[in-house]
C-alpha cells in the first residue's frame, strides 16, 4: 500500500527548517540530507509518545526486514542534555534493538514539546499505526497541554473537526470499554452509541454483549433506543367504593359469618372500562364450610 502523503501540515512542513545540520557534541556530523548515526543506547523514549500498543507479529516482521535491509527511514529525535529523545520511529527503534543493531540513522530536530507531539501523532496517523484511543489521548494532550482548540488540532493533523471531536468523546467511556476499543474488539461506532447510555455499568454490560454476541452498530442503536423508552405507566383506575365503606362492610360480614371476609371493590379505568369486584369468605375445614353454607341458606344435603 502506498504511503499516505499530505496529511495535515505534513511531516515535511513540520520539520522544515528544524533540522540540526551542524555537528553535535554526542554524535557524528550529519550528511547533506541531515542524517546521522547515533548509538541506540543514547536514544530515550518519548514520554509523549501517543502509541502504546505494538503488535508482536508486525514487530517481528520489521526485525527480519531490518536484519536484511537495515533501517530505510531515519528516526526523528531531538537532543536532551547529553542524549537524544525519540520523536518518531519507536517501532523502528524497538526492532533495531531486537535485531541487535548498535546504531540507527536519525534526523535531529530543534523543536519544542508541541511540535514533537504533533510530529509523533502525524507520523503514526499516516502509517495507520494508532488505535482510536491512542489517537484520542494524543488529541487531548494537544488540547490540555498546549491549549489547542479542536479546530486547530484538526488543521494540524489533517482531519475534520467533527472527526477530532467524536474521537475525543470516546475518552468519556468507562475504562473497560475503552480497552475493548483499544484492542479492536468493538468499534468507534459502538463506542459512540454507548456514550448515549447514562449509566457507566450499563455501558460496560452492553460492551460485553457486543463482544460476546457480535452485535452490529445498527443493532446496538436499536437496543439502546429501546432502553431509553419510558416504562409503561400503570393504567389509571378508580375504586368504585370508598375504602372506609369496604372496611366497615368487611367487619360486619366477619361478624356475621364468624370468619374473615375479603372484599375487592369494582374499579373504573380511565377509558371507562369496568374491572369486576369480588367477595371471598374464608373457611378452615369441612365443618366450617357447612356452617358458612347454612348461614347462606344452603344445605349440604341439597348439593
Image: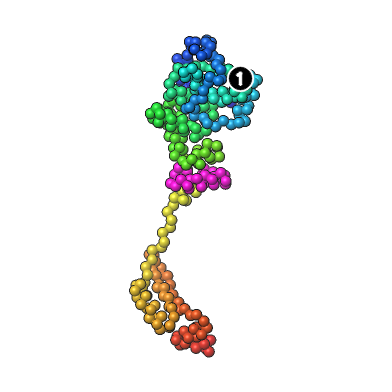
Across and down, in percent, residue 189 comes to 50, 39
Q: Residue at x 44, y 37 (%)?
A: 169
Q: Residues within 10 Å of mark 1 (few under 14, many from 20)?
A: some
Instruction: Note whether residue 91 is visible.
Output: yes
Q: How many marks?
A: 1
Q: Main secondary structure of the magenta part?
A: helix
The magenta-colored residue range is 194-220
Looking at the image, is 288 positioned above or below residue 44? Answer: below
Q: Residue at x 47, y 51 (%)?
A: 226
> Residue 105 lies in what quarter of the image?
top right
Q: Mark 1 sits on what residue?
A: 101
Looking at the image, is 11 positioned above or below residue 234? Answer: above
> Residue 232 lies in what quarter of the image?
bottom left
Residue in front for this viewpoint, 51 or 125: 51
As drawn, which residue projects farthest toward the front? 82
Color theme of the render:
rainbow
Instruction: Note whether residue 5 is visible.
Output: no
Residue in front for this viewpoint, 100 or 179: 100
Across and down, in percent, residue 44 comes to 51, 23
Q: Residue at x 40, y 84 (%)?
A: 256
Horizontal relation, residue 101 to residue 250: left or right: right
Which element is circle 1 on? loop
Across and down, in percent, residue 136 comes to 46, 33
Q: Residue at x 43, y 78 (%)?
A: 260
> Residue 168 lies in what quarter of the image?
top left
Looking at the image, is 292 positioned above or below residue 236? Answer: below
Quadrant of the frame with the N terminus: top right
Magenta highlight on residue 196: yes
Residue in front for this viewpoint, 295 or 222: 295
Amino acid at each position: 500500500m502506498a504511503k499516505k502523503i499530505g496529511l495535515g501540515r505534513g511531516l515535511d512542513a513540520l520539520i522544515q527548517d528544524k533540522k540540526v545540520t551542524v555537528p553535535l557534541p554526542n554524535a557524528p556530523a550529519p550528511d547533506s540530507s541531515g542524517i546521522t548515526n547515533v548509538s541506540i543506547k543514547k536514544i530515550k523514549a518519548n514520554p509523549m509518545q501517543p502509541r502504546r500498543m505494538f503488535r508482536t507479529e508486525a514487530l517481528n516482521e520489521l526485525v527480519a526486514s531490518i536484519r536484511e535491509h537495515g533501517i530505510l527511514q531515519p528516526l526523528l529525535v531531538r537532543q536532551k542534555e547529553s542524549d537524544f529523545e525519540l520523536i518518531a520511529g519507536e517501532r523502528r527503534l524497538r526492532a533495531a534493538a531486537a535485531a541487535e543493531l548498535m546504531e540507527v540513522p536519525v534526523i535531529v530536530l530543534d523543536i519544542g514539546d508541541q511540535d514533537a507531539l504533533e510530529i509523533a501523532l502525524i507520523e503514526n496517523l499516516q502509517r495507520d499505526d494508532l488505535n482510536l484511543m491512542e489517537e484520542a489521548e494524543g488529541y487531548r494532550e494537544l488540547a490540555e497541554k498546549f491549549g489547542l482548540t479542536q479546530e486547530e488540532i484538526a488543521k494540524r493533523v489533517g482531519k475534520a473537526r467533527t472527526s477530532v471531536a467524536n474521537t475525543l468523546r470516546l475518552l468519556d467511556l468507562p475504562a473497560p470499554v475503552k480497552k475493548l476499543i483499544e484492542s479492536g474488539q468493538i468499534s468507534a461506532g459502538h463506542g459512540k452509541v454507548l456514550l448515549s447510555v447514562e449509566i457507566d455499568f450499563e455501558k460496560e454490560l452492553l460492551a460485553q454483549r457486543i463482544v460476546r454476541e457480535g452485535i452490529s452498530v445498527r443493532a446496538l442503536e436499536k437496543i439502546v433506543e429501546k432502553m431509553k423508552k419510558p416504562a409503561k405507566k400503570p393504567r389509571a383506575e378508580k375504586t368504585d367504593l370508598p375504602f372506609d365503606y369496604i372496611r366497615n362492610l368487611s367487619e360486619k360480614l366477619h361478624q356475621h359469618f364468624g370468619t374473615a371476609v375479603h372484599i375487592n371493590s369494582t374499579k373504573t379505568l380511565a377509558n371507562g372500562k369496568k374491572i369486576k369486584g369480588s367477595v371471598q369468605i374464608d373457611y378452615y375445614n369441612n365443618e366450617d364450610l357447612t356452617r358458612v353454607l347454612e348461614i347462606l341458606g344452603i344445605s349440604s344435603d341439597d348439593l
